[in-house]
Image (cartoon, coloured by chain):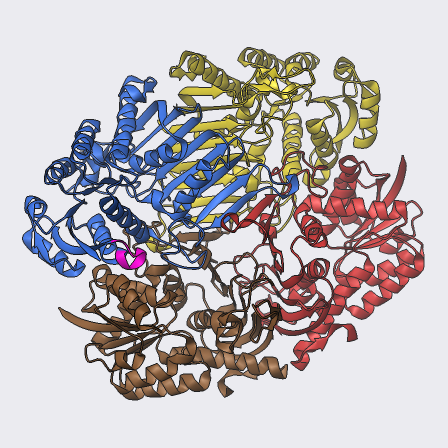
Chain colours: A blue, B yellow, C red, D brown
Amino acid sequence: MTQIGIGVIGAGYMGKAHSVAMAAVAAVFDTALRPVLEMICTTTEAGAAERARQFGFARATADWRLLVDDPKVQAVVIASPQHTHMDIALVALARGKPVFCEKPLGLNVAQSRAMVAAAEASGCANMTGFNYIRTPASQLARQIIAAGEIGEITYFRGEHTEDFLSDPNEPANWRTEGLASGAMGDLAPHMINAALALAGPIDSLIADIATVHKTRPSPHGAVAVTNDDQGQFICRFANGAMGALFFSRTAKGRKMGYAYDIYGTKGSLRFDQEDQNALWLYKGDAKADRQGFTKILTGPDHPDFKAFCLGAGHGTGYQDQIIIEARDFLQAIATRQPVWPTFRDGMLVNQVIEAARQSHAGRRWVDVREV
Amino acid sequence: MTQIGIGVIGAGYMGKAHSVAMAAVAAVFDTALRPVLEMICTTTEAGAAERARQFGFARATADWRLLVDDPKVQAVVIASPQHTHMDIALVALARGKPVFCEKPLGLNVAQSRAMVAAAEASGCANMTGFNYIRTPASQLARQIIAAGEIGEITYFRGEHTEDFLSDPNEPANWRTEGLASGAMGDLAPHMINAALALAGPIDSLIADIATVHKTRPSPHGAVAVTNDDQGQFICRFANGAMGALFFSRTAKGRKMGYAYDIYGTKGSLRFDQEDQNALWLYKGDAKADRQGFTKILTGPDHPDFKAFCLGAGHGTGYQDQIIIEARDFLQAIATRQPVWPTFRDGMLVNQVIEAARQSHAGRRWVDVREV
Amino acid sequence: MTQIGIGVIGAGYMGKAHSVAMAAVAAVFDTALRPVLEMICTTTEAGAAERARQFGFARATADWRLLVDDPKVQAVVIASPQHTHMDIALVALARGKPVFCEKPLGLNVAQSRAMVAAAEASGCANMTGFNYIRTPASQLARQIIAAGEIGEITYFRGEHTEDFLSDPNEPANWRTEGLASGAMGDLAPHMINAALALAGPIDSLIADIATVHKTRPSPHGAVAVTNDDQGQFICRFANGAMGALFFSRTAKGRKMGYAYDIYGTKGSLRFDQEDQNALWLYKGDAKADRQGFTKILTGPDHPDFKAFCLGAGHGTGYQDQIIIEARDFLQAIATRQPVWPTFRDGMLVNQVIEAARQSHAGRRWVDVREV
Amino acid sequence: MTQIGIGVIGAGYMGKAHSVAMAAVAAVFDTALRPVLEMICTTTEAGAAERARQFGFARATADWRLLVDDPKVQAVVIASPQHTHMDIALVALARGKPVFCEKPLGLNVAQSRAMVAAAEASGCANMTGFNYIRTPASQLARQIIAAGEIGEITYFRGEHTEDFLSDPNEPANWRTEGLASGAMGDLAPHMINAALALAGPIDSLIADIATVHKTRPSPHGAVAVTNDDQGQFICRFANGAMGALFFSRTAKGRKMGYAYDIYGTKGSLRFDQEDQNALWLYKGDAKADRQGFTKILTGPDHPDFKAFCLGAGHGTGYQDQIIIEARDFLQAIATRQPVWPTFRDGMLVNQVIEAARQSHAGRRWVDVREV
């Protein structure tokens, strides 16, 4: 049994999720490498110590460089704010340490490219944190498509819609400034990653992006919102299929609207993360009077399900996605083989977002490969 | 009790639906004008006679001009192929007869404009046949929006997806040629009409249109498909809201995918014609821990429902939509007041389609008002 | 073309529905016999005249005996209050006239037996009005079961739940008195009929029946409710399958909860009238990782659908069920062959209700065949 | 920070789930007591050692008495076969150790009563493992009912249906013998516990129980199935409400059919574990034309959700329920206050099952309080 010392940077929502995942993953999946919660880092020493106690880390720090340099920290999970990702990753990789980095990988495509270059040069395991695509249902969707069961994809519709900023009276906060925390920066990555994973590369797109509520209250009066509330694009995939993607944090009523409809020449798929344990499959070759969408409840016959529960329909949840990510990160380290989605996959998402921004600015179709 | 002689041109699917509607509407709605099924017209004399017998018309003809000229025919329903709409309508209006014309109104915006001009000059009642918007659920959606219950609309997503040509081995037929019978010509009108009715005028759009299956088998070998299988556009409405519309006849598994999601500043609406008796409403002002989409089953408290059944959830269907159209047409005639959707409303739909075609051809945003 | 004069007794909700159906059925189904709306009867001469005008009947009366005796009335539809069914039916049958009678057939099993005896002795067409089982979806369920697709039935759960008397402040009305208008008398018949049609004869049952709101307001103060608000029983079918049926008019939120789940050795079915255009089918022989309930949208490949609309998912509604009943009644008359459900089928439903009442009174299992 | 040594007996499905829960719970909930995985017990020494390694326990044993006696084991989780529950619990309680015992508590009501007596005499924390009622959705249902939001309950329908033995060719196994592993013994406890928690005590019931597939293949030919495949009862709750409960392991297509419909005088609730992150609420006081069931997606405003994820709709799963149980067990130990559901609550479930068995045998209504 080989242990591996884990350092987690960031102790907010995602830092906690990754910490819990590292505590649980070996028992859930009987991984070859078994995490030891070595050190956690957050903004203050006191806060870090408190989180270390709660999450079960041996040590704590407020200086990520200490964590990255620590000899007992053998792998690094970056769950800190987006503008810190690149710096941390570059140092960790320079130290020869595997890095798991939350999405979006870099603040922009240039940062992400630098991270990819460093990761690939280092030979270290590197992954980007796209957790929603890890549900058994979305993994099953990928399998069904790969097996040709729905034929050639002809249309892909995806959305990532939530409503946490739908109320115009919601005060300004860190989410209402900075491109990486707007709808295009914060929500689009998940669904763009899904689109690429499910329907393949995007060739070209035309986008429209908007700030729905242009100012928000603050203790100092109304302040301008400096990033986008919603964005969308239509596109063509490399195989010729059409696509349409929509991202919004003002989609009233949508709580986790990570959803896709995929039409193919032989069948189709529908999924909505708000009911994450079901995948809807339509097979065109069914008898005419018995056709319809079949609601497949994920179960032990589907990817990564039976580690969590033996009965179909018993259900996995958000935290389980993070545990699956942890399993994959440990496996990438143990086997020294890249495991999807790597930093490169994270960078490809930045590239599409960048293309969308250029398209919106120029009101024109943009070739994604030229961004 | 005032009777009115009805002539129906076309005895296929829609001709039958309108004939049944005219036979039932007075009993259902106790209309002021009571239809007499005076004459039906289809391509052959024998066919017309046979249909007259089945549908209960007094007389039959294979010549639409005879029908239009007949003094006992006091109102005309056009349910014949799309290329015939304008000629028939112009003659009927010239005779001073009210005209109900199936969608798409004309083959293109020029034809539709001619029809609007003739209709408005004549002073005759004129309506375009957009039946799906007549369900109690979609009428309720319009009421909810008009009452401001979901606030200002911020996003509209609409689709009209079916799969009747999703199989590449489906032989070429009349639907695979002629722009008016492609996805943009045949399916788009319904959902564009819905978008205009629900979210208001469209200012600008950018579209992409494609023929998924470029040839189809025929008795003479593979022949080219000369119209589109699917099309989509993103747009901005006059109020600034974003929109995305998609139309397809190759959307495997979708049978009547006339569906919309509408987000507003105070709430949202979701609807899918495949479950036409339900409208999903989300109200942002509900208590945080009791929020969610409410599935409203249409019932006697909703528009036009109780004429068909007294109990909520008992359900109306496709034929009932046509009966509601007949009621409105009779009312427009009786009251000499326009009833929505008039020819002008039909023309506005052609205008958006034309804008989409120009946009696709030019790969650019198009101002709809300039088309 | 043979016409047949129709007399309808009752001009309320059901009388209207049958009148509309008789006006539309020939056009919809091209029936061999074509109804002529000859006479309608309701409680006052003025009311009858008014309804005749609206529904399109040639004549009106307030005396059902006049209608039944009228030589131009060749078939009788009974849609009047339940306590009048037997008397009218017996006279009509004695005149040799076919009778369609709304459910419940008689007030009790004794009345229904008398009606069956008269009907069978007369040789006249006779039918009982169970409309909900006529949807394309429920007809498809019957086909699937008959074809053995779900194997031997092992469990049947049915309910007919509505909430029109769920509010204790709803005043007393005709529905709150008389056993035939309580939940067991008024709602149970539809679902018991469905159970018999779908799962076969019921051998034995044990029931529990209750009045939830024991008094209701009236202009004269609180008055006692003299019939039941809800009832249920568990049972064994002749094939050994277990069953559970529930009927309620106080099931808050349920508007048309005519719903069943049927489990068999090879598959299962689920249906809810609130989404009447879908039937959910599970096939046990599907591949383990592709199993699930398939939502079959009714369409032209299913029973009686294509007369109303050509596209799957376009949907039929409540009124269409009544048109299907009219088609069957005309066919029974034309062919002189019984068409299900006959008076005998209506009587079998009364028998189960009677068994349930005896069981409730005696707090014991009752053998239905001995009632 | 106070640690507590945990011993888990049983290393199968449930043993794993509880082990993972104990590893994760402190990080998830920041519990006052922090579990140390001290020892695990399963049938062989080698197996126990292997599980200890995977799950992260310090030590392993094949003798549960050693585990219970071990001074470092300060609390015991019983996840071993049902016939072992009582013996283990009695010894552990005699040693003054808190016990969490999987359902069903004892093999029968007599065993459970002995366990309750021992637990209550010992003053030790004691809980029964009903995990499904721990979802945020079902906890919310309890809150809504307790707050009177749906008024007085008038009807409760519950089922726990699965299909793992629906195929008659599925070989005989340990589940097909022993009353505690049949549908009534294995599935009924969860839903009976839900019924008691949601609708209150059951006064009386009448049951029917059956073995659908009476023999099953085995290596030695067909063998008799000695327990039940399905069972059901109708009942009256102490408040007068009617109930109906159904349990089946042969309900084709149902994977986790733990579902309930609850009707009250002011509203109603619907839930199905197959979509465990949604609770459907109907409020009778909504405006007539805006009424309907609201699909509440569980989120941070609902019980125990935000420890797992901050966004509504992001979803919890099966493993999370077990973590919630662990939190409660630790809290009961730390606070020395009983936490629902205790052994007594587990015993009350046995009592209802026993009443159902007596009712079935005697074909009569049974007063639950007299069992």
Which quadrant is home to the N terminus of chain D? bottom left
At x 28%, y 17%, the residue is: A362
Q: Is residue D110 left or right of residue B42?
A: left
Labels in figure, total:
0
- Magenta includes B365? no
**In this view of the protein, can residue C256 be seen by the observer?**
yes
* In the foreground, B121 or D334: D334
- Magenta includes A31? yes
* In the foreground, C52 or B345: B345
Q: Is residue B92 left or right of residue D190?
A: right
Q: Position of residue C277 (x, y in %)?
A: 61, 45
Q: Is residue A231 left or right of residue C113?
A: left
Range of magenta residues? A26-32
Q: Position of residue C362 (x, y in %)?
A: 68, 81
Q: Is residue D239 above or below residue B179?
A: below
Q: Is residue C128 above or below residue D185?
A: above
